[in-house]
């Protein structure tokens, strides 16, 4: 067995370039109902209409701010 001590991971903060406060508003597509009360199938439809989404492996992430702007702009 290794005698090396395991150090706890530090929290990573992401900052918005427009403000000095820390913000991280991405949520997983699979947790969309809990995060923003929008069904994942609805979000997939929004993706086809142009809503930005981000993939990391099999996981798909969406920005809450971009979703709000997309809906305000007039998603059908």
Image (cartoon, helix red, strand yellow):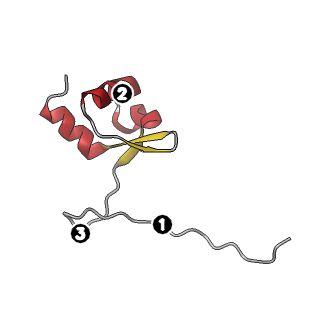
Residue 13 in picture, x, y percent from top left: 39, 65
Q: Nearer the viewer, residue 27 or 53?
A: 53
Camera-near label (3 vs 2) is 2
Residue 30 in picture, x, y percent from top left: 47, 34
Q: Secondary structure at mark 3?
A: loop
**Distance CA(mark 3)–CA(mark 2):** 32 Å
Q: Is residue 4 above or below residue 45?
A: below
In the picture of the structure, the residue carrying the numbered disc 3 is: 20
Residue drawn where x is 26% and y is 66% of the image = 21
Residue 29 found in image quarter: top left
Q: Secondary structure at mark 1?
A: loop
In the picture of the structure, the residue carrying the numbered disc 2 is: 44
Estimate how packed mark 3 is, as few (under 14), some (14 to 19) or many (20 or more) residues with alpha carbons within 10 Å.
few
Instruction: Tell me the number on the disc at residue 11.
Output: 1
The answer to the question of whether label 3 and label 2 lie on touching residues, with beta carbons closer than 8 A, is no
1 or 3: tag closer to the N-terminus = 1
Residue drawn where x is 81% and y is 77% of the image = 3
The answer to the question of whether label 1 and label 2 lie on touching residues, with beta carbons closer than 8 A, is no
Residue 75 found in image quarter: top left
Residue 14 found in image quarter: bottom left
1 or 2: tag closer to the N-terminus = 1
3 or 2: tag closer to the N-terminus = 3
Estimate how packed mark 2 is, as few (under 14), some (14 to 19) or many (20 or more) residues with alpha carbons within 10 Å.
some
For the N terminus, which image quadrant?
bottom right
Residue 35 in picture, x, y percent from top left: 39, 39
Q: Is residue 59 above or below residue 39?
A: below
**Position of residue 4 in the picture relative to residue 13 (left or right):** right
For the C terminus, which image quadrant?
top left
Residue drawn where x is 25% and y is 46% of the image = 65
Residue drawn where x is 30% and y is 27% of the image = 48
**Position of residue 18 in the picture relative to residue 33 (left or right):** left
């Amino acid at each position: 067995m290794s005698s090396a001590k395991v150090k706890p991971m530090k929290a990573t903060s992401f900052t918005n370039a427009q403000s000095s406060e820390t913000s991280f508003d991405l949520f997983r597509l699979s947790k969309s109902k809990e995060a923003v009360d929008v069904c994942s199938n609805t979000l997939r439809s929004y993706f086809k209409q142009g809503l930005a989404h981000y993939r990391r492996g099999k996981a798909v992430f969406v920005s809450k701010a971009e979703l709000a702007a997309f809906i305000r702009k007039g998603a059908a």
